Amino acid sequence: MQLQLLAALPQKSPKNPGIPVKQLLTKEFKLPTIQLWTALFFAFGCLYFLVSWIPKLASNTGLSMELAIYAGTIFNIGAFVGVVTQGYISSRIGLKKTIAIFLVSTAILMAVFQVFIGTDALLFIFGLLGFGVQGGYVGLYAVAARMYPTEFRTTGVGWAIGAGRLGGVLRPALGGILVGMGLTMATNFMIFAILALLAGLFAYFISSKEIS
């Protein structure tokens, strides 16, 4: 790594007794913490709905089961490209703006999804959905890592992920209920488009001076 060799190790700091979660809710961090948790809750909800139900929802559009399974693969390929692209764009225009663009674009695409049902573009649309929602929600991890000082950064990141996972647990169950009710695929996507939209808006308005 071409770093200068240390003549001696630095003095050991006193043992940290642990950082309670209340540090995340002090005056300086309370509002951005709640905004971050809410953004992750909605983003995870939308993501896990798509991951859990894409093969089933794809087959409902008339695709063969084989192509419906490929829809999940294409979704994840799009996700990989989205994560890499999000990292590049955020270094140019800022993290919050980039996340908002990704998630709001995902919401728009989900809202107009019915236009593509029955067309050859359907698998490509699944790839774009993976690109947008995965790129957006992974960016929220970076927000959590930057937002908190070193002293309780792990606590902040851990609780933020926990808030997101809660949405990840609840939303696929809701998706199952909606599918069981016989709602159309377009209606399901419209409902979960709202979650992506809210996630993007909450991410954009995170009021932390540490995040551009």
Image (spheres, rainbow, N blue to C red):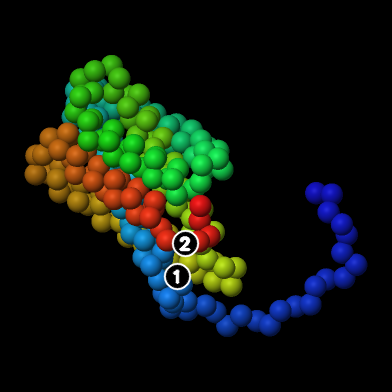
- 67 or 124, which is in the foreground? 124
Callout 2, which amino acid?
A: Ser
On screen, residue 132 versus residue 186, left or right, reads right
Position of residue 13 relative to residue 144, above or below, is below
Instruction: Give the crowd class for mark 2: few <14, some 14-19, many >=20 residues within 10 Å.
Output: some
Q: Mark 1 sits on what residue? A: 29
Disc count in the image? 2
| Residue contact at pointers 1 and 2, CB within 8 angstroms | yes
On screen, residue 147 versus residue 1, left or right, reads left
On screen, residue 59 versus residue 42, left or right, reads left
Q: Is residue 66 visible?
A: no
Residue at the limit of the structure toward the left, as seen here? 181
Residue at the limit of the structure toward the right, as seen here? 7
Q: Position of residue 61 (x, y in %)?
A: 19, 26
Q: Position of residue 99 (x, y in %)?
A: 42, 45
- 168 or 95, which is in the foreground? 95
Asked which quadrant contains residue 32, the reply is bottom left
Q: Mark 2 sits on what residue? A: 208
Q: Position of residue 151 (x, y in %)?
A: 59, 72
Q: Earlier in the sequence, mark 1 or mark 2?
A: 1
Q: Element under label 1?
A: loop
Q: Residue at x 11, y 39 (%)?
A: 183
